[in-house]
Image: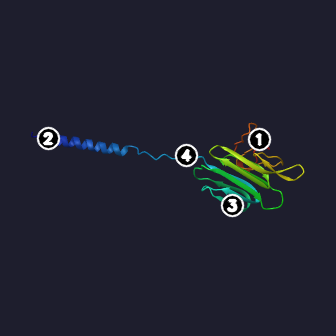
Amino acid sequence: MILSKQTLQTMRSYWLSLLAGAVFLSSCSKKEEAPVEEYEEYAYEVECDFCEISYIDKSNNTKTIKNNRGKWEYRFDSKITFELKLEIKTTLSDRQTIQAYILKDREVVFGDIGYNTAIITYNTQKANGTGSYGARQNNGTESPSNGGGNNGGSTTPTSSVCGAKNKTGGYCKRVVVDGGRCWQHR
């Protein structure tokens, strides 16, 4: 079978056009992107003066900050699958207020106000926490308080998230502007 020169040129043009079209279409196809793993961002937030803060870091190791003054934050920049723990105690003999919170996606999930000591834990898998806080009694003495409640005093949280307990037992999630007070819970 002998093909004419014109038939060969037509077939060559056809195949080149087909090849060029295939290259063009394959270059326009979207490449699959690796899925981005979403995770819940946890953080600690503490406010106290002259206190020692011990906490579990992102590697599940205990770290300690000595003589903290003012607000302290620690944010986890990766997925957390272990129990978070935060322990704060004053380094002065005078009574002092301690505000200790655990945040999830910038909203308070556990924490409260105590006096001189606070120990809080939060299980990230079960979404529950425990707390023990020093409390100011009517006679002026200190005693521990369990369960995350504030058993005395008249201080108001100045966390960046309100964090006050609401009527249903949960926590208020309103963001406090400029570190001020959450006006709904004065």
N-term-proximal mark, 1 vs 2 = 2
Q: Which mark is residue 184?
A: 1
Q: Nearer the viewer, mark 4 or mark 1?
A: 4
Q: CA distance from mark 2 to mark 3?
A: 85 Å
**CA gap, disc 3 to disc 1?**
34 Å
Indicate the amino acid at tag 1: Gln
Tell me what residue is drawn at x 84 percent, y 53 percent.
Answer: 142
Q: Earlier in the sequence, mark 4 or mark 1?
A: 4
Dot 2 surroundings within 10 Å: few (below 14), some, or many (20 or more)? few
What's under tag 4, amino acid-wise? Glu
Q: Nearer the viewer's eye, disc 2 or disc 3?
A: 3
**Label 2 amino acid?**
Gln
Q: Which residue is mark 3?
A: 64
Mark 1 to mark 2: distance in Å? 88 Å
Question: In this view, which residue lies farthest toward the right?
Answer: 139
Is tag 4's residue or tag 3's residue first in the polypeptide sequence? 4
